[in-house]
Image: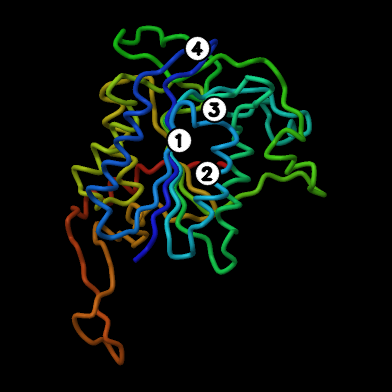
Amino acid sequence: MKNLYVLLVGINDYPAPNPKLKGCIKDIDQVEAYLHEFCSTDYNLKIKRLEDATATYANIKSGFREHLAAAGPDDIAWFHFSGHGSEEKTAPEFLALEPNGKDQTMICIDSGIGGVPHLADKELAVLLNEVATSNRKSPPHILVSLDCCHSGSGTRDAGEDIKWSVRAAPSSGASRTLDSYVDGYYTKLRSLEVPTSKHVVLSACKSVQLAGDMPQGGAFTTGLFKALRAAKGNLSYNDLFLRARLTVQSVRDNQTPQFDTVQNFDPYVRFLEGLLLVSGISMKWSSKMAIGTSNAALSMDCRHNLQRQLNLMSTLHLRKRY
């Protein structure tokens, strides 16, 4: 049986000056409830939760290195973050890689206290690469889901319904130094390069937008699990993203979830399972009959309409990110 390693981070109780949030713990509750209900018979669930006071910068790094990095080549590693996002000035050495001069960041519970930094996108790239290379044979199936803003504004969207608050915190205005990223990782390189690893990222909004937050959960996480529960997980990442995006945009006009694949991650494989969904057909091997000299059979699950799948393929939006 495959192992499913999950690192869940949810932060509501931010200290000032960052505004407190309401739905981030509910988000990781949604993830964990789904896993126990739909995945516990197919996977060995290995779930680590970091919430509020335990969701420190150091603990999140350790969660990658001591928990997710244990995933083997046949396993799944999933990182989910619900909390504040922001943008910070990147280190001067990265200006050639970042035309806007900004890091997109996740704010840990202790970020900004005693010199503790935000968790920057370039640090997430390093940590994901460590997970991908911890087993020399081949990397695990890696999924990242981020329900946070990547905006420097801490104000409510103009014209937004008053029931929504947003998951954005003001930028500190400070610039990072190169040695402050992940234990000085980038100072040890001969040539400055952000590592990449094969994975998929589902994120709440565009880099210039705000992610909606309510007591019952984030707009994005709620939309994601509404789609998963309706299909009982039988969706490709492409289909899941499009359904979640429709749900989010039905309640928030100015929030557009994003879907990123890195290093040729196939967006048409089934969520978590990694099996290919071709024209709405889930293909998997079983031992029902002999084909040639092997005792293998191809079983097909035709739950999705072919034309719908073709329509989804034609509207897929992919971007390359770290």
| Earlier residue among tags 3 and 2 | 2
| Earlier residue among tags 1 and 4 | 1
SS type, badge 3: loop
Q: Is 160 left, or right, of 140 in this rendering?
A: left
Q: Nearer the viewer, mark 2 or mark 4?
A: 2
What type is the residue that disc 1 sits on?
Leu
Q: CA distance from mark 1 to mark 4?
A: 24 Å
- Whether tag 2 and tag 4 are in contact, CB under 8 A, the answer is no
Q: Looking at the image, which residue is at 60% across and 52% down?
A: 130
What quarter of the picture does the N terminus occupy? bottom left
Q: Which residue is mark 1?
A: 50
| Earlier residue among tags 3 and 4 | 3
What type is the residue that disc 3 sits on?
Cys
Give coordinates of residue 253: x percent, y percent.
Answer: 33, 20
Q: Looking at the image, which residue is at 38% across and 19% down?
A: 254
Q: Which residue is mark 4?
A: 154
Q: CA distance from mark 3 to mark 2?
A: 13 Å
Q: Which residue is mark 3?
A: 108
Q: Is residue 241 above or below residue 113?
A: below
SS type, badge 4: loop
Q: Is residue 167 above or below residue 77?
A: above
Q: CA distance from mark 2 to mark 4?
A: 28 Å
Q: Specify the quadrant of the image occupied by residue 290.
A: bottom left
Q: Specify the quadrant of the image occupied by residue 300.
A: bottom left
